[in-house]
Amino acid sequence: MSAYAVRTLALLEARLRLRRLSTLATLLVVVAISWLVISDPAGGHTLISAGGARVRYTSSALALGSASQATLLFALAGFYLLRGRMGEDLRSGLGGVIGASQAGNALCIIGRWCGGVLYLAALAGAFMATVLVCHAVRGEGAIEPLVYLQTYLLVLGPMILFTASCATLFDSWAPLMGKRGDLLYFLLWVGQMAMLPAVTESAGPPAAIPVDFSGMSAIVTLFSHHLDIHSIMLGIGDFDPKLAPITLPSWMWDGATIATRCVTTLLACLPLLPAVRLFHRYSPDRVRPARSRARRSPLALLNGWLRPLARLTQPLFALSARLPGMAGQALADVALTLASAPAAIALLLAASVAALAVDLHALPPLALACVACWGVLVSDLPTRDGDAGCALLGAALPGGSARRYWRQLAAIVVLGLMFTGVAMLRLGASSPLRAGALLAGVLALAALASLLGRSSGTGRTFLVLFLLGLYIGVQVNNVALADVVGFHGTATAASVLTWLAVGIAAAWGGHLCNRHRNFS
């Protein structure tokens, strides 16, 4: 294994990922989140507050505050963005070529890992560049690039290495290549977040934890030297303008915390050792494209048990055969989606009954749960034809791929209304604005699912960003734009119209992307 070979493979891997349209979509999301998190103090919100007083937007404050938000974003989304490259090799037939080559396991694994690290580092660099621009607009004091660079390296560096290591390990070992690996990493991410209460509630002074790859314990440790960590708000928080702002020193990292992060960096690379040892090397007796059919997941077992519920979709199929044009085709897509996932039919029936029975104050949480189930269900609908190998067949039908795009978008919207329609009608009687936010949110999310699915060729891109956005939306309860589906009741007429505009722009952008892919 030579340095030149590793460098070549790493650059090739990074270029393949950076050239995808999904990378552009991810960058736009990163830019939007960075500007959303760093609120304008003139609007009554701030990134960091302690004891009701806001912390000035100096380089150290913005670097630590933005890095704390970025590590949550990249630790979860980064893994799923890196996942699937070896699965693509299997589907394209390239896996057999790689497996038969003279390249050793270590070269294949290290080269792919380095490419993933470069890819995530590029996204983190774009995030930092956006924060620097935001500092120029909203910051207080001079921009200190070295302060930003030190903070991002110490906070995001170990996290990027660990995320890339886990993605490489899970793709290298056959039992973790599918949904089982996705669930295991999500549990690891939740475990990382669970370490934070142990740090803040410790009897003595908090200290950074070596196995905290997210870096949140290190950030809390640094803040504890200058702020009361029991009264600190990190994210989008309120502050009392009558209190004097707090100014943090430029250089906050001490030797002990830096040493802990260096140890964490070494530990982040440990998953590469079993990855080299367990690498399947695309051997047909260890992994194959249809391996997921050999072992049924718990969801597949549940769908098998609920298979009789699929008969409830027969009237929909019959009606779709009678309806002319796109309406019938969209309804057929709805029926096919429900028939292929009987568990979704059970959830739909339960959600409709619950929306009729619960009190009005319980409707928003129920509607949010319905939106979550709907988003997971439709995440792969825009790519279903391509995954089944019948995209060209659908393009040969009247209207071609353009009609297929619009009917799939219509099917996603119809499914969204089926899941949330009862709750939407009941909310409309008591809170029309909240019902309007729910409707606008469903339309915008449906358009984004179509855009991201069509541009990236996989439903995983939308699913990851959707779940992350859902998590952020639940946590942020005082920003109108973050209340996408009216969960908190903070949505305004302006935010509803904004999400409608986002939906229209995303729908048209997906159409243009669809045309570009057909002509390229």
Image: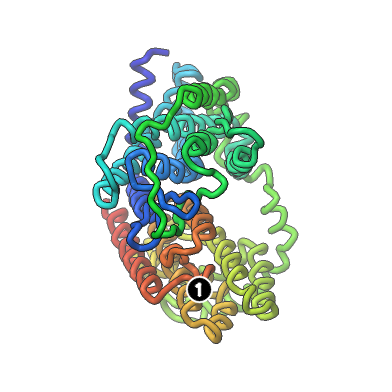
Residue ranking furthest to the bottom: 429
Residue closest to the eye, 251 or 211: 251
Can you see residue 232?
Answer: yes
Residue closest to the eye, 155 or 318: 155
Q: Position of residue 355 (x, y in %)?
A: 64, 77
- Residue hosting label 1: 414
Residue ranking furthest to the right: 305
Quarter of the image containing the N terminus? top left
Question: Measuring 57% from the left and 27% from the top, which residue is drawn there?
Answer: 210
Residue closest to the eye, 133 or 227: 227
Q: Position of residue 436 (x, y in %)?
A: 46, 78
Counting the numbered discs, the total is 1
Q: Position of residue 146 (x, y in %)?
A: 30, 31
Establish if 269 lies above or below 360: above
User: In the shown orientation, is residue 43 left or right of residue 371?
Assistant: left
Q: Position of residue 144 (x, y in %)?
A: 28, 35
Residue 189: quadrant of the picture: top right
Can you see residue 269?
Answer: no
Establish if 431 lies above or below 80: below
Question: Measuring 28% from the left and 55% from the top, which residue is drawn there?
Answer: 516
Question: Measuring 59% from the left and 62% from the top, which residue is drawn there?
Answer: 373
Residue ranking furthest to the top: 2
Graded by Cα atoms within 10 Å as few (under 14), some (14 to 19) or many (20 or more), the crowding at tag 1 reads many
Inspect the image, locate mark 1, and give the three-letter code of the amino acid beneath it: Val
User: In the shown orientation, is residue 198 left or right of residue 415?
Assistant: right
Establish if 279 lies above or below 139: above
User: In the shown orientation, is residue 111 left or right of residue 193?
Assistant: left
Establish if 163 lies above or below 500: above
Find numbered disc 1 in the image and state the secondary structure of the residue it sits on.
Answer: helix
How was this image coloured? Answer: rainbow
